[in-house]
Image (cartoon, grey):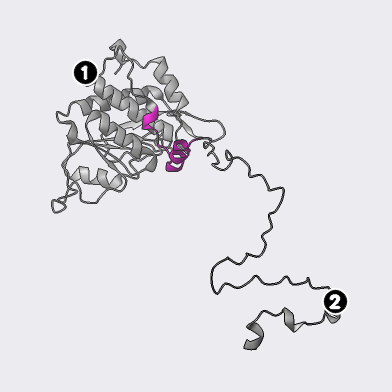
Amino acid sequence: MSSGLDSLVLKDEDVQMMLAAQVHIGAPNVDFRMENYVFKRKEGAGAYLINLKYTWEKLLLAARAIAAIENPKDVIIISARQYGQRAAMKFASYTGAQAIAGRFTPGAFTNHVIQDKFREPRLLIAIDPALDHQAIMETSYTNIPVIALCNSDSRPFLVDIGIPCNNKGIKSIGLVIWMLAREVLRIRGTVSRSLKWEVMVDLFFHRDPEELEKDSKPAVEPAVADPWAAAAPIEAASTIPTFGAPAAPAGIPGATAPLPAVAPASDNWADQSWDPTTVPTGVADGW
């Protein structure tokens, strides 16, 4: 399909990106309807390897089908798999399609009673035919064509255009959807084929919310200045002042004289004698 025009030929840069994202790594099992897209199997009964030539040709065919839809909002991309939800929303953002990320509401394509969820798309894009089987089944009732990412063990039942690739890897799903969005924009004329698309492929990769929180926090928290550290130290007084008994104010009637000094008590209480004259006036009478 892509052998006619040089601009549609699979470039070495795209092949290197596919190999780095492990787009060609299939599942340990293979469906009999996907055998034509399998290159060979790894040694030791490993995973099947998908032929990237067929992946590119099916991707171009899917991009032409998407670009043929006049209203971009009539295209719906759905992903029940968590790893493909971010890619689905980014595809919808750049191409103008609608995205259904998460659980699909049964009857959204056939039941008119569900007014909030009811939609009438002209084309459906599914990330995984196994997880999105409910939406694919409903499209068969309304004659809606389906584009799906199919692994080696996927069951391409009711799928019109199956793109053979690894639909379980985070980087694989993001790269295939990124390349699909790029080809759609190139066919529409929005992006030139001679220039590199400025959108990074990393935006289509799934990211864990915990990793996002770690990246948002600074690596080293800035030290908070201690307000007490800059204050000058308080010097201790060399001598402790002593305060004597207050003197009687002169010229004030009713003022009493200061109390006489009491001798300090000795350690032995038996040697002490009590002198009633030392008791202030008025205290002994009150006893």
Percent position of residue 36, x then y? 38, 29
Can see residue 105?
yes
In which quarter of the view is residue 80 placed? top left
Residue at figure coordinates x 63%, y 83% from the top left: 282
Quarter of the image that includes the N terminus: top left
Residue under the image location 55 percent in, 41 percent down: 226
Q: From the image, tell me which residue sits under label 2.
A: 268
**Residue 173 at x, y percent in the picture:** 38, 33
Q: To which quarter of the image does residue 131 belong?
A: top left
- In the image, is residue 22 above or below residue 225? above
Q: Position of residue 164 (x, y in %)?
A: 36, 31
Residue that mark 1 sits on: 189
Give the residue type that dot 1 points to: Gly
Looking at the rendered image, the quarter that the C terminus falls into is: bottom right
The quadrant in which residue 203 appears is top left
- Magenta residues span 202-218
What mark, if any, has residue 168 been given in the picture?
none
Q: Secondary structure at mark 2?
A: loop
